[in-house]
Amino acid sequence: MSFLDTRIDHERSKEAAKWLEEEISEQLKRYKKIVSDMDAASEKREQWYQEFFDRIQNQGFNMDGDTRVKIPNDDLPVKPDAKHKVVY
């Protein structure tokens, strides 16, 4: 057996196939709920990002102990064009 040949042929019982189908449908329902919640929070998320950027530019980022470093505009990450994606 080589590393390229990793598939094990097996038969699934009807009971296992039914359980698997139910489990997949439940997971898809949960995923869709999470995606809708994440989409609903998109405006808040933009506000959170801006508040965070303002905070690290004005108050600074805690480097070590009481040492704070203010982050310049050039070092802030660029906002991606794509929308947020829920990965599971």
Image (cartoon, grey):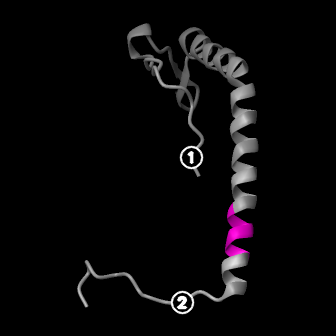
Q: Which residues are magenta?
A: 19-24
Q: Which residue position holds label 2?
A: 11
**Location of the N terminus (image quadrant):** bottom left
The label shown at residue 87 is: 1
Q: Is residue 21 magenta?
A: yes
Residue 38 or residue 23, whichever sits in front: 23
Which residue type carries mark 2?
Answer: Glu
Residue drawn at (38%, 82%) of the image: 7
Q: Is residue 6 magenta?
A: no
| Mark 1 neighbour density, 10 Å: few (under 14) some (14–19) many (20 or more) | few
The answer to whether residue 51 is above or below residue 65 is above
Of pointers 2 and 1, the one earlier in the residue sequence: 2
The answer to whether residue 23 is above or below residue 69 is below
Which residue type carries mark 1?
Answer: Val
Q: CA distance from mark 2 to mark 1?
A: 30 Å
Helix, strand or loop for the magenta stretch, by majority: helix
Q: Answer left or right for 4 relative to 15.
A: left
The mark total stands at: 2
Could you say where residue 65 lies in the image, as x and y percent from the top left?
Answer: 57, 32
Could you say where residue 67 lies in the image, as x and y percent from the top left?
Answer: 53, 24
Residue drawn at (38%, 10%) of the image: 74
The answer to whether residue 36 is above or below residue 77 is below
| Mark 2 neighbour density, 10 Å: few (under 14) some (14–19) many (20 or more) | few
Q: Secondary structure at mark 2?
A: loop
Could you say where residue 54 lies in the image, as x and y percent from the top left?
Answer: 60, 10
- Quarter of the image for residue 56 reads top right
Residue drawn at (57%, 15%) of the image: 53
Q: Secondary structure at mark 1?
A: loop
Residue drawn at (56%, 46%) of the image: 87
